[in-house]
Amino acid sequence: MTIKHVAADAGVSLQTVSRVVNKETGVRPQMAERVQASIDRLGYVPSIAAQRMGGSRSYLILALNDRERTIAAWRARQGTDWVDQMLLGGMLTCAEHGYRLIVELVDTHSDHIERELLGAIAALQPDGVILTPPHSGNPLIIDLLAAQDIRFVRIGSISEGPGVRLMMDDARAARIATEHLVALGHRRIGFIAGPAEYELSGWRVDGWRAAMADAGLACTDLLASGDFSHASGRAAARTLLALPEPPTAIIGSNDQMTLATLELARETGLRVPEELSLISFDDTPIIRLAHPPLTAIVQPIAEASARAVSLIIAG
């Protein structure tokens, strides 16, 4: 079934069908209803090529994700729950509006990032681009997109510059988690941060530090960091738990690192939560399999990507 069949059935030109498919103005209401009736009767599903034919939109949205982190997680067979949630929100919203979401894995440290990005844009001609961390804070990528005069949304970034900034209040979330632990009576609260190249890592540390300071608690030796992987979380937790006065509670900056902390605690004989309290960030499906159950800061990952798609479509 093609656009030609719809045009023949409705008795109109290909251009008229294309205008209706692309929801363009300039088609009389009665004519648009006739074309739509043919589309419904024939069960026609517009292809991307048909949508492009009569309009300026490609009906494609490009999402850039961190290649290094995604592939590392896949090779370690640890899953990519964050990516899954991001894809889910974006793809569902795209589908509601007749769009397609295309994902490209880009290494933010690559010397070829300019060639990769411009090549993808030239090949796909997307209507917009979604940048996820750490790309959302990368000045080179931001400047490249701005120079292409293309709509783009930066998830998890408040850095000045072009593009629509879409962020969650990570500092406040870390503060709330820390205050909760303080209220439970904890005085030694450790924090496992993510990599520094992610802006949100710094915000979460800031929130933790602020809450500790408000409570009159020291935190100079209670900060460790990882790269969001299970292995790095385990190493960071080992550092904290090996302190002469180890923490009685630890906040992990993502689910993988928090689960690694839980695993290490179990191996060293620490009972959770009786002897060590844990709070995680993200609340992806994997954390819900933890035993005992863990408290997690819910990050609206799917909602953020859905919102990014909506902003691009709205123009």
Image (cartoon, helix red, strand yellow):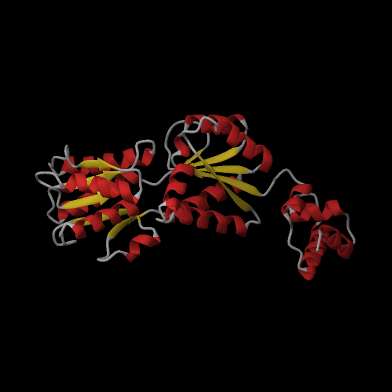
- Decide if residue 248 is on the left or right side of residue 315: left
Furthest-left residue in this view: 244
What residue is rendered at 27% in x and 61% in y?
294
What residue is rendered at 78% in x and 63% in y?
36
Depth order, front residue of 77/142: 77
- Decide if residue 85 is on the left or right side of residue 58: left
Q: Position of residue 71 (x, y in %)?
A: 47, 47
Q: Position of residue 141 (x, y in %)?
A: 52, 33
- Decide if residue 189 is on the left or right side of residue 304: left
- How many marks the image carries: the answer is 0
What residue is rendered at 52% in x and 48% in y?
308
What residue is rendered at 31% in x and 51% in y?
257
- Decide if residue 301 is on the left or right side of residue 24: left
Locate the N terminus and report the quarter of the image it occupies: bottom right
Q: Quadrant of residue 118?
A: top right
Q: Position of residue 20 (x, y in %)?
A: 77, 55
Depth order, front residue of 264/61: 264
Residue 155 visible in the shown view:
no
Where 179 sits versus 114, above or below?
below
Furthest-front residue in this view: 75
Residue 182 visible in the shown view:
yes
Q: Position of residue 202 (x, y in %)?
A: 32, 38
Where 87 sits versus 220, above or below?
below
